[in-house]
Amino acid sequence: MQNLAAGDHVLTMSDDGKRFVASEVAFFIHAEMNRTSLFYTVTTVSGHQISVTPDHYIRVENNGYVIASQLTLNHSLFVTHLNYPVRIRSIKKEFKMGLFSPVTFAGTILVNDVFASCYCLNNLRGTHYEKHHLYAPFRLWILMSLADIPAKAVHRLLVINPLDETILTDDVLVTGTYKYF
């Protein structure tokens, strides 16, 4: 994680956990090499391991995303190269040095072949999906700056409603699931 930079491309997985998707790192919420924090190191029965802060979202079978502190040995995680979710074998709490939280345009990332969210539960609260909608303006701003699109080109966008995933524009109502900008 410490070697990643905004603009780098990383692998993630589709929401169903069945195919790889490349996504660009948009920005970092945290990039603190010398910060010590509590981590939950989760190991699956297949030997895959991920270390995340207690409030970090992890994709689990049947429940969408759960924060690490709520994981149990009854949960199964999505792991690359396997066609099925993998049961958790152990969860260990430990303090580690370095706190990195890259945000991709997809809102997810593969860490040691384990499918994880880029978001955590913090003072803003909300689910993984609500956080992804919350950070949409930042991702849009980054894309506009990369493409050198003038701000007036997006003036027609009036409302983004993350609760029912509806986007209203001047004359058009478009519904569906929006995961990329």
Image (tube, rainbow, N blue to C red):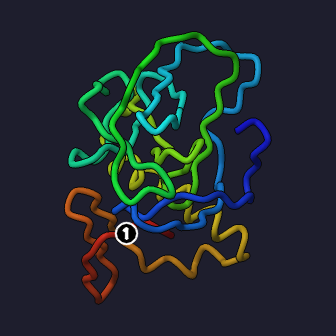
Q: Does residue 12 lie above or below 143 as drawn?
A: above
Q: Residue furthest front?
A: 46
Q: Position of residue 128 (x, y in %)?
A: 36, 45
Which is more toward the observer, 94 or 171?
Answer: 94
Which is more toward the observer, 93 or 47?
Answer: 47
Q: Does residue 52 lie above or below 46 as drawn?
A: above
Q: Identify the residue at horizontal 37%, vertical 69% (top origin).
A: 178
Whether residue 123 sits left or right of residue 144 in the image: it is left
The image quarter containing residue 16 is bottom left
Q: Identify the residue at horizontal 33%, vertical 37% (top origin).
A: 87
Quadrant occupied by the N terminus: top right
Whether residue 72 sits left or right of residue 79 in the image: it is left
Name the residue tied to disc 1: 178
Q: Position of residue 59 (x, y in %)?
A: 37, 45
Q: Identify the residue at horizontal 34%, vertical 49% (top origin).
A: 85
Q: Position of residue 169 (x, y in %)?
A: 34, 80
Q: Amino acid at mark 1?
A: Tyr
